[in-house]
Image: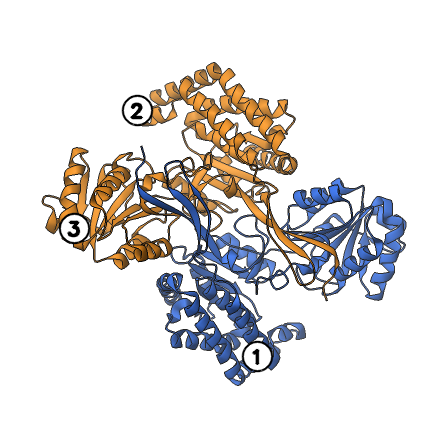
Chain colours: A blue, B orange
Amino acid sequence: MTDVVALVRQYGEDARAASRVLAAATNAQKNQALLRMAELLEAEQDNILAANDQDTAAAAANGLDAAMVDRLRISAKSIAQMAEGVRQVAALADPVGEMDDFKILPNGLKLGKMRAPLGVVGMIYESRPNVTIDAAVLCLKSGNACLLRGGSESFHSNQAIAKVIYQALRETGLPEACVRLFETTDRAAVGAMLALNEFIDVIIPRGGKGLVKRITEEARMPVIKHLDGVCHVFINRDADLDMAVSIAMNAKTSRYGTCNTMETLLVHQDIAATVLPRLQAAYATKEVELRGCERTQAVLNNIAAATEEDWFTEYLAPILSVRVVDGLDEAIAHINHYGSHHTDSIVTNDYADIQRFLREVDSASVMVNASTRFADGFEYGLGAEIGISTDKIHVRGPVGLEGLTNQKWIVLGSGQVRV
Amino acid sequence: MTDVVALVRQYGEDARAASRVLAAATNAQKNQALLRMAELLEAEQDNILAANDQDTAAAAANGLDAAMVDRLRISAKSIAQMAEGVRQVAALADPVGEMDDFKILPNGLKLGKMRAPLGVVGMIYESRPNVTIDAAVLCLKSGNACLLRGGSESFHSNQAIAKVIYQALRETGLPEACVRLFETTDRAAVGAMLALNEFIDVIIPRGGKGLVKRITEEARMPVIKHLDGVCHVFINRDADLDMAVSIAMNAKTSRYGTCNTMETLLVHQDIAATVLPRLQAAYATKEVELRGCERTQAVLNNIAAATEEDWFTEYLAPILSVRVVDGLDEAIAHINHYGSHHTDSIVTNDYADIQRFLREVDSASVMVNASTRFADGFEYGLGAEIGISTDKIHVRGPVGLEGLTNQKWIVLGSGQVRV
């Protein structure tokens, strides 16, 4: 126990020191390291795949279900995608040092803002080994050192990927401690990490709701977190019904397990009788189970009642809650009360209703005539995402380079003193 | 105890409901309420002063020291200043609904950002009653409901000010629950508040370091906090010495008790022998005690040695630590290690050194040829400040309207679905 605490403390101290060097690194230096990582990922493909085989074999032997083992698995194709992702991040503009919002104060001081790295980012994540490279690369480009605590199931895969990262840092003259993957699977390391507010500026957890809750409660530093994705589509009275059905189908059925999948469909009462039967038929082809409010049940036969619990639920499965609402007010109130402030969309052509929906829906992404499934870092052009935030402060929605930075005030004077 | 928990929970629930109305309120509605508050502050001046007399009399009777009693005291002049401050905030641009950063994605989706209120802001503060009106006004203008827990010493003053706020809200048709000053002085109310992450989106503590630490540790929601202000001025080798002395004097002696006061002076070794004696003579006229490193002591007679502890200390008193450094590298390293990431200034005419200082000093405000004393919301033109953040995420330095908002993603489509 004490050894782990000391080890994690050392990781933190080294990361803090490395972060100072990295904050001053040029875009060219950082890109050189990134492009070398991409090359090495490809060159070391066989080692990474062999390490991954160890992990998947152990997972299967430990009785993990097939879906879990599948999430662990890396292929030659996924390594190629990782390398491509690294190159995409290298190609992004460097946010660090960007200056903005300059104005001249009455006393002649020039006041503006400069974008700066957060410092040291701590990531705690489960399974998927690609998080190791995604997180390292986004942190590096945004000038942050990072401490990575991966899941024990992907231990060997993560280490093989980290080896490539360390080598690229060494070869390009950046401190190896810019990225540190934990070499211990001791669970006490997580607790030690969460107490290290002296050296870690922010924690980003990626994993199940239980993990995220525990981390948020225990962390002594700020947490950028994703809790759940209870996303809505509201079909307004005037919606183009073909568009509405297309969006509602895509938002629910294109993938069931993603956080930007719709979990509750809201339908304006004026068109419920028209659109609900069409939707029921369409969902039936995908074997999506519908659970409805009383007014939905009055239109559709043979569907179960949605309980109060259902409205709060992220199914991550072919199940959909359906509610008929009086109009825009009730739709917005439902979303703000039952939703998770993730992503919500309205289908309509009504200008005034759009203005109100955009302004009053309190979610990270608010959409008009588009599928909720678009809410992610790649689709938004961030190059990649280190997570999706459902928090209200610092950053909302997909977290890319900008979310890993802050803005400091810059004051340029010529000798001014305060009277 | 249970009653207090239930009461605070009710405050939270009401504030959440009010925040939905306020998020949709127009700038005109909010300004109407603000301007009415300013009028009522002036009209109710006698009541507020009488309530304040109660507080100051009680404080004196309870043996609070004169300085504390003085901080509690309100005068006709300070009420006039409060009213003026309210009018200034009303005159600021409404940040809510501001749209920015729009781009068109390859699939035709228009992606941008819209500024939105955080929701419900919880303030916990000590003594000074003007925080009640400042916080209420900034939250209202930025579309946030707020829960205010003031200090027991200023209970009557705060209630008298709150009465004016409630009346203005009622008269202008905004929910009274947009602002709620706690009516209990039960200390259990603070604990109850900090557990209410369901209804409170962010906590802003204002008070001593002990209070802030306790709140940060206990709060279940994010905290925007100000810990301490260990600010530095670095006099570079090429500094204009008149300017350097003028800034160093102002930064230390214009006020001792403020967080943007310089606590440590760093001097380039090449000019130590020239500038330190001048500074010593100048500080002597203000009876500022100097504590120096060995190299400082070698130049100046009769000054105490600065201990490791001194470099970390916010004196808030006429005491100054002085250190001679080899150059820019050591100055930056000292500031980042011993400082509190608040405000630091360099005096120099060297372009390359300025670029490095601005980029590498990890502080909320980084200045060139200006006194650290400028770091506050009024000086920065924010109209007012609800606090000064020494955090690394969300907002750094003076927190005005923008710091009380976030940006959500806006996606405008024409029927797009994800393939």
Q: CA distance from mark 3 to mark 1?
A: 65 Å
Q: CA distance from mark 3 to mark 2?
A: 40 Å
Picture layout, residue A366 above or below residue B34:
below
Query: Considering the numbered disc 3 on the image, is that residue within a helix, a strand or a loop?
Result: helix
Quadrant holding the N terminus of chain A: bottom left
Quadrant holding the C terminus of chain A: top left
Picture layout, residue A244 above or below residue A184:
above
* Dots 3, 2 in contact, CB < 8 A: no
Of marks 3 and 1, the one in the foreground: 3
Of marks 1 and 2, the one in the foreground: 2
Which residue matches tag 3?
B272
Left or right: B263 in relation to A396: left
Q: Chain of mark 3?
A: B
Disc 2 crowd, CA 10 A, few/some/many (<14, 14-19, 20+): few
Q: Chain of mark 1?
A: A
Q: Position of residue A6 (x, y in %)?
A: 36, 65
Query: Three-letter amino acid code at disc 1?
Result: Ala
Nearer to me, A77 or A11: A77
Q: Position of residue A396 (x, y in %)?
A: 58, 52
Which residue is found at the position 38% from the left and 66% from the top? A11
Nearer to me, A407 or A106: A106
Which residue matches tag 1?
A58
Q: CA distance from mark 1 to mark 2?
A: 70 Å
Q: Chain of mark 2?
A: B
Which residue matches tag 2?
B66
Toward the left, the furthest residue is: B301
Q: Are marks 3 and 2 on the same chain?
A: yes
